[in-house]
C-alpha cells in the first residue's frame, strides 16, 4: 500500500489553464492536471491513494474548492479543503470542513500571502487544532516566489510549539531548498514531514541521516505530483535503503493513522 500525501489536480474545465499558468513559475508538469491524469500517474507509480492539496488563493475560493473536493473524493482520492487564513470566516469554515467530512486543510504562505508564524491567525490555528483536521502547509522557499522567509523551519517549530495538538504537516521535508536549516532545527522535533521534491536535491547521505534522526511516526511519502514525478520520488526513496519497517511507515502506515 502506498499513500501519496501531497498531490494536485484541478477541475477538468480549469486544468489546462491552471497547468500552463503554474508552469511559468514551476517546473514542467508530469500530468495534464486533471483527476484522470492524476489517477493515471498514480497507476504508473503504484500509488494506491493520494491526498489532493488545493489552494484557495482568495478567501472566496473556499466554496468552489469544497464543492469540487466533495464531488471527486472516493476510495483513492483524499481531497483537502483550503482556507485563506485572512478570510474573516476562517474559523467558521473549519467547522464546515469538519461537518463535510474532509480530512484536512491545505494552506500556502506564498500563494496566500501570509507568514506561517503570524500570531494574527491564532484563532484559525486553534480552531484547526481542536477540530482534529490535518493542516498541511507548504514549507520552505517556493520556486515561483522571491526567497522571503515565510514558512521556514523556525516558523513551523513555533507553530507546533504553540499548538502541540495541531496535526500539522510540513511539505518538502520541512522546508523546500532550505534543508540544512531543517536538519539543524526541525529534525527530531514533533513535526510531520513529507518528502516531496526533496530527494531530487539533497545528497542521499544527508537525506538518509535526516530521516533516521526524525521520529519514525512523523515521516510521509509525498510526490507533489504533477510538479514531482512519483515514480522518481519512490525510486530515490527506495535507494536510501531504509529499514523495511520504517519504509512501510513512510509509504502508508503513518498516513493511514494521520488521515484516519
Ligand atoms: Zn504542492
Image: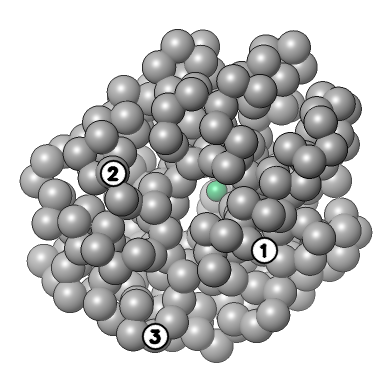
Where is residue 138 shown, x and y percent of the image? Answer: 44, 43
Q: Which mark is residue 164?
A: 2
- Number of the front mark, 2 or 3: 2
Q: Which mark is residue 50?
A: 1
Where is residue 132 shown, x and y percent of the image? Answer: 35, 65
Please tell me whether residue 221 is drawn above or below residue 94 in the rendered image: above
Q: Is residue 169 visible?
A: yes
| Drawn side of residue 206 relative to residue 40, left or right | left
Where is residue 57 shown, x and y percent of the image? Answer: 34, 58
The residue shown at (73%, 26%) is 200
The span from disc 2 to disc 1 (Cα, nearest Å) is 26 Å
Structural crowding at the residue carrying mark 1, measured as other residues with C-alpha within 10 Å and reported as few (<14), some (14–19) or many (≥20): many
Q: In the rendered image, which residue does mark 3 sit on?
A: 100
| Drawn side of residue 70 relative to residue 19, left or right | left
Nearest the eye: 187 or 82 = 187
Structural crowding at the residue carrying mark 2, measured as other residues with C-alpha within 10 Å and reported as few (<14), some (14–19) or many (≥20): some
Q: Are marks 2 and 3 in contact (CB under 8 Å)?
A: no
The residue shown at (49%, 41%) is 192
Nearest the eye: 221 or 69 = 221
Nearest the eye: 236 or 186 = 186
The residue shown at (43%, 65%) is 104
Q: Are marks 1 and 3 in contact (CB under 8 Å)?
A: no
- Ligand 1 is within 8 Å of the C-beta of the residue at disc 1: no
Amino acid at each position: 500500500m502506498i499513500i501519496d500525501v501531497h498531490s494536485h489536480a484541478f477541475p477538468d474545465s480549469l486544468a489546462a489553464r491552471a497547468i500552463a499558468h503554474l508552469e511559468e513559475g514551476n517546473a514542467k508538469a508530469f500530468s495534464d492536471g486533471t483527476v484522470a491524469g492524476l489517477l493515471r500517474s498514480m497507476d504508473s507509480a503504484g500509488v494506491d491513494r493520494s491526498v489532493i492539496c488545493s489552494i484557495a488563493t482568495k478567501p472566496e475560493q473556499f466554496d468552489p474548492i469544497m464543492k469540487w473536493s466533495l464531488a471527486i473524493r472516493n476510495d483513492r482520492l483524499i481531497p483537502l479543503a483550503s482556507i485563506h487564513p485572512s478570510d474573516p470566516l476562517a474559523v467558521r469554515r473549519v467547522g464546515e470542513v469538519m461537518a463535510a467530512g474532509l480530512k484536512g486543510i491545505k494552506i500556502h504562505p506564498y500563494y496566500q500571502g501570509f507568514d506561517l508564524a503570524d500570531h494574527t491567525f491564532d484563532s484559525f490555528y486553534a480552531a484547526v487544532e481542536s477540530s482534529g483536521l490535518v493542516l498541511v502547509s507548504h514549507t520552505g522557499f517556493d520556486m515561483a516566489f522571491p526567497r522571503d522567509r515565510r514558512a521556514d523551519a523556525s516558523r513551523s517549530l513555533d507553530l507546533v510549539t504553540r499548538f502541540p495538538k495541531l496535526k500539522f504537516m510540513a511539505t518538502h521535508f520541512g522546508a523546500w531548498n532550505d534543508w540544512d536549516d531543517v536538519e539543524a532545527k526541525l529534525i527530531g522535533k514533533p513535526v510531520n514531514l513529507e518528502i516531496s521534491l526533496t530527494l531530487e536535491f539533497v545528497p542521499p547521505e544527508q537525506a538518509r541521516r535526516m530521516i533516521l534522526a526524525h521520529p519514525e511516526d512523523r515521516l510521509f511519502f509525498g510526490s507533489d505530483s504533477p510538479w514531482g514525478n512519483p515514480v522518481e520520488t519512490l525510486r530515490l526513496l527506495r535507494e536510501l535503503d531504509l529499514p523495511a519497517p520504517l519504509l512501510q511507515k513512510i509509504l502508508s502506515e503513518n498516513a493511514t493513522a494521520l488521515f484516519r
